[in-house]
Amino acid sequence: MIKLKQNVAKSLLDAISKAFGISEGLPDEVQISMMLEYPPDDSMGDLAFPCFKLSKVLRKGPPMIASAIKDVFACDGIEKVESINGYLNLFISNNYYSKLVPEILAKGSNYGKGEEGKGKTVVLDYSSPNICKPFHIGHLASTVIGYSLKKIYEFQGYDTVGVNHLGDWGTQFGKQIAAYKMWGDKATVEAGGVDELVKLYVRFHAEAEENSELDNVARAEFNKLENGDEENLALWKWFVDISVADCNKLYKKLGVTFDSYNGESFYTDKMPEQVEALKKSGLLKIDKGASIVDLSEYNMPPCLILKSDGSTLYPTRDIAAAVYRDRTYHFAKCIYVTAAAQCLHFAQWFKVVELMGYDFYDKLVHVPYGMVSIDGAKLSTRTGNVILIRDLINAAVEKVSAVMEEKNPDLENKAETAEAVGVGAIIFHYLLNSKIKDIDFVMDDALSFEGNTGPYAQYSYARTCSILDKAGDFVCDNFEISDNSEKELSKTLSRFGEVAKYAADEYEPSIISRYILDVCVAFNRFYHDCPILTAEEAVQKSRLALVKPPNIVLATALPHICLKTPRKI
Ligand code: ARG
């Protein structure tokens, strides 16, 4: 469709010059192609060109412009043109769509792929949980949105680097170490893993509420850690290993991977250089003993760089990490996926990096997402009142297993498929709506096999596989579109390339999720309206040939939103 739009734009420009005898002051081809719209309903054509913006340059009313263009417009692939209310409605020929099918078949998994990213690198910072704290459903959002963006950017031709910026440094480790020294023991932590560490952490907070002296103890322990105390370093390393191993189990279930696990601690020796640079540039101010960068000129509270005891902070580590990533990867973009609660944090240190004179400041992108709740209940950390992602996944997989046991008891790989569908249901639910909207997770909605769900999408894909498996090998040399639902399906498939690019431009996996649903709906309608296996041979082959393209597009698009593609459900 991208190509067709380009051709249409070129032909429109020719037609405008011809009809009005001018070529100056007109929008260019790219602008025209961006002005093309998809009409809300078929009767208004497949593409529409609004003539309102031209009215200024051409000094004529939009309806008159539309009808003048109509008289001279001609373009390959467009079979009919209508001018209505200042719009030029364009009808794409069946022949164009008929040619699309062999194109998709030939390109296979490369169909829709973009090239803008060739030779460029995008760094993506996602998941990034805090060690020793529970991995909650909020972090799941960062994990799946971030990994999905990684796939989406790869599809635009970029090299990508996925970084798990582990929260493995900071005062909370003082608390964790203090708690362990007071109440923990090796055997219990070894047996209980992260759950035990979280218990200790939660207990620390509860007791510190009563006894504020504990906070001083924790601060002292963190200070020792920052100064390289061996005992504390060993404990810290042990806690990190336990936590990371636990997270890795989850990543494996989700199919999410990283290229680097350089967490906050990795930047310990890289921060002094940035603190020095801040001092030298005169940006660093002392405020009540702490070192800050004043951002009042930019309507933001100050960015904290060092506490009064000299210990570093979250922004300090982010600044050092950004410089390191720029030097290591020479990124075209560095994308950070976190909860919207961190918007100010990113705005602040992005500004500091800009003030420091780093030229990569405008390549930093914060991608925030909304609040996550389950069945309406908001989440709170710290108190231990969190819904662990592990429990959520287990519940989903159990429910899917029960449904499958009833509907398809003879299925091979039952356990594996139930996990793919159960996990997929949760992810899809996360990625269905614009990321900045709050997500309320309702289990029964997410798991339904009908409606806008992961199971529906995966099931539709499995249906394409089963039809193709039943058909066996076939050759169709004479593909033709004859029915309206065939055309609708082709039209939906033709949009994949531009949808994929749009999702990258907007940092929005939900654009892919919505598109997947469009493909599934169009495919299921075609399947319902156009009998395949009972049709006469020529029609049958032609229809079968139309099952393969949605199969290809879904096989490519589902992994873009972290969904697996079981061939049988
Ligand atoms: N660990 C942080 C948290 O859980 C998220 C880190 C995001 N990445 C970053 N470079 N700041 O809230």
Image (tube, helix red, strand yellow):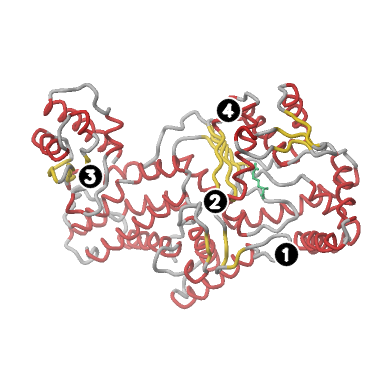
SS of the residue under disc 1? loop
Give coordinates of residue 505: x percent, y percent. 44, 40
Q: Residues within 10 Å of mark 3 (few under 14, many from 20)?
A: many
Q: What amino acid type is highlighted by mark number 4?
A: Phe
Q: Circles 3 and 2: CB distance less than 8 Å? A: no
Q: Residues within 10 Å of mark 4 (few under 14, many from 20)?
A: some
Which quadrant, please, contains the N terminus?
top left
Q: Residue 559 bears which disc, if any?
A: none
Q: Which residue is mark 1?
A: 384
Residue furthest out toward the bottom? 406
Task: Answer above or below: position of 131 versus 15.
Answer: below
Q: Which quadrant holds residue 210?
A: bottom right
Q: Which residue is mark 3?
A: 47
Q: Circles 1 and 2: CB distance less than 8 Å? A: no
Q: Which quadrant holds residue 111?
A: top left
Q: What amino acid type is highlighted by mark number 1?
A: Gly
Of badges 3 and 2, nearer the viewer stands 2
Q: Earlier in the sequence, mark 4 or mark 3?
A: 3
Query: How far apart are the two marked residues, 3 and 2, measured between alpha carbons?
Result: 33 Å
Q: Earlier in the sequence, mark 2 or mark 4?
A: 4
Residue furthest out toward the left? 71
Q: Which residue is mark 4?
A: 360
* x 45%, y 41%: residue: 504
Q: What amino acid type is highlighted by mark number 3?
A: Leu
Q: Which residue is mark 2?
A: 369
Give coordinates of residue 473: x percent, y percent. 30, 55
Q: Circles 4 and 3: CB distance less than 8 Å? A: no
